[in-house]
Image (cartoon, helix red, strand yellow):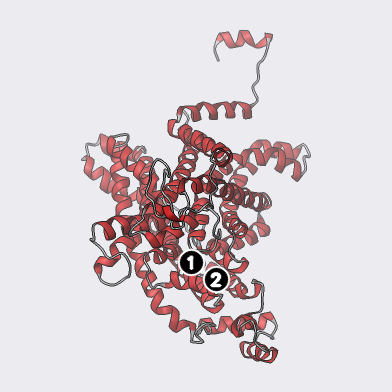
Amino acid sequence: MTVYIIRRVLQLIPVLLGVSILVFSLMHLTPGNPAQLMAGESAPPDTIEQIEESLGLNDPLPVQYWDYISGVVQGDLGTSMRYNTPVADEVWPKFVVTLELSIYSTILSIFMGLLAGIISAVRQYSISDITIMIVALFGLSMPNFWLGLMLIQWFAVNLGWFPPTGWEGPGSIVLPVISLGTAGAAIIARMTRSSMLDVISQDYIRTARAKGVKRRVIIYKHALKNALIPVVTVAGLQFGALLAGAVLTESVFAINGMGRLLVDSIIQRDFPVVQACILIIAVVFVLVNLVVDISYKFLNKRIDLND
Amino acid sequence: MSNQQVEAAPTQPKVENPRVKAMKDFYRRLKKNVPALIGFYTILILVIFSFIGPWMLSADPSDTDVINKFAGPSAEHWFGTDHLGRDIFTRIVHGMKLTLGIGFASVFMGAAMGIPIGIIAGYYGGKIDAVIMRLIDILLAFPGILLALAIVSILGGNLINVTIAVAIYAIPGFARIIRGSTLAAKNLEYVDAIKALGAGDGRIIFKHILPNVLSPVIVNATLYIATAILTAAGLSFLGMGAQPPRPEWGAMLNDGRSYMRDAGHIAFFPGMAIVIVVLAFNIFGDGLRDALDPKMKK
């Protein structure tokens, strides 16, 4: 197990390196000169030269990358072109909001998805199974930003139960979390159902049934434990999708999180902030997947750890 | 083997091509899958309608009617009008071509790049495979809409760039699936036999591996169109895709969000249109997968 974990962590290095190179290239791949962008259209050439010099834009690319990455490792994410403040100060408080939103939504997805998936599998082809699967298909097919707008319309504007925007107080988190978590719940419900059905048809379950083990015990103790294994992977992937999907939800609910900051910064061409937001989401996603992979191996001891 | 077959054999041995037989099996199973058929016919109708619809309607999607702005659904304006008094039904009908076009084009481009990458990785294996898969891992580290956002931030926001962004985002999925299927197909005995007969790599790949890996591609592509449409609509919703006055559905939703309090229908109908299209592709994709899955054979 330890060997596996070490190998898996070592495998991260090229991925993180690649991610950082891609993120670093964002500013250089984009048409136009960053110094010109910072200084404005009508800036005199020597101002632009000065900015280029101070940002190190005249250095060879590998040197610039080295400067960038050694800064990032030390927590220096650059300087915002718009506000001329350290990006890290701008990003971290907003990252916390986005992380909260994603975590709550993931919890909702897992809880609802598991519940619905188990009911569906246990009562295959019943009315509740069919209803759940139809609802899940809709959940999967709905744009989360549209669902958010509709939730605002019904529960905030018409019924007045929740505030339509913001991220302050327990009431305000309900609609964004439902809006972001629904698609994940649908995916997890479908995964749980098919995984449960797979397991239920296996010999050891039939044996347990033949031995006269109670139905409840079979479902929750024997079947669910094994059925959960593939669900864990999906839940991990979902967390990443929700972290990125928060971009849309935050925009709908006017939540001051990292997603909204990312979109604003893309529109304003504030590249250091764009780079920081994308880098943080990608790194968090990669780390979550690492944890998921390790727990996957841990849950499923049959998998060859040397694989 | 029964006696009858033995007797019939000398007169006319009827050997059916296994691939043709597999296709027939597949159609037979697909025809039994009612939801899949509903999905398929919905897609077909939507595609046809996206071409003839705009031609059937007399109104222009950009025609404004300032007196009737914010009007709710009525006999005259089926889905009501928006903040500029434009007819929402007309705009949705005109926008259908954009939505379907982005979906098909981006998945086609993603498959065109992902399939060769996956086949090369799976077929040649070794170092080539390791390098390709690490690069794919790097792309996969950007979850969901993030990769598309990053690409659009470089290229700038318009419909063509959104299509390119969504296509690039599709590459890793195709490459991975194809690599897996190629690995499985490569080890089939008959491929060894063909190799022994002296067939070259190109011939093996195009004539023997490719047909074997196509069915997961079709399922993946169908389901991916659904994701592509959602992603592209999301980018337009954020103001990074279609620019006004284009009747793109995500952009229409973006128009409507400011008027949720008084005119919720402006955002409701374009969203509903997205749901129906995406739902059709998801149902059809599910059905295809079931029909192609050997475990479902009865």
Point out residue B148 in the picture as x, y percentages from the top left corner: 55, 61
Give the residue displayed 60% in from the left and 72% down from the top.
Answer: A26
Q: Which chain is home to disc 2?
A: A
Query: Which of the two residues, B60 or A279, is positioned nearer the viewer here?
Result: B60
From this viewpoint, is residue A136 visible? yes
On screen, residue A307 above or below B295: below
Could you classify mark 2 by the number of other residues whose Cα lies within 10 Å: few (under 14), some (14-19), or many (20 or more)?
some
Element class at badge 1: helix
Is disc 1 in contact with disc 2, using a CB cutoff of under 8 Å? yes
Question: Which corner quadrant holds the N terminus of chain B?
Answer: top right
Point out residue B276 in the picture as x, y percentages from the top left corner: 44, 43
On screen, residue A230 above or below B20: below
User: Which residue is tagged 1?
Assistant: A286
Indicate the amino acid at tag 2: Leu
Q: Which mark is residue B166?
A: none
In the image, A166: left or right of B154? left
Q: Label 1, label 2: how many angstroms apart (C-alpha)?
A: 8 Å
User: Which residue is tagged 2?
Assistant: A16
Give the residue displayed 61% in from the left and 83% down from the top.
Answer: A40
On screen, residue B277 above or below A50: above
Give the image quarter of residue A272. bottom right
On screen, residue A154 above or below B55: below
Q: Are marks 1 and 2 on the same chain?
A: yes
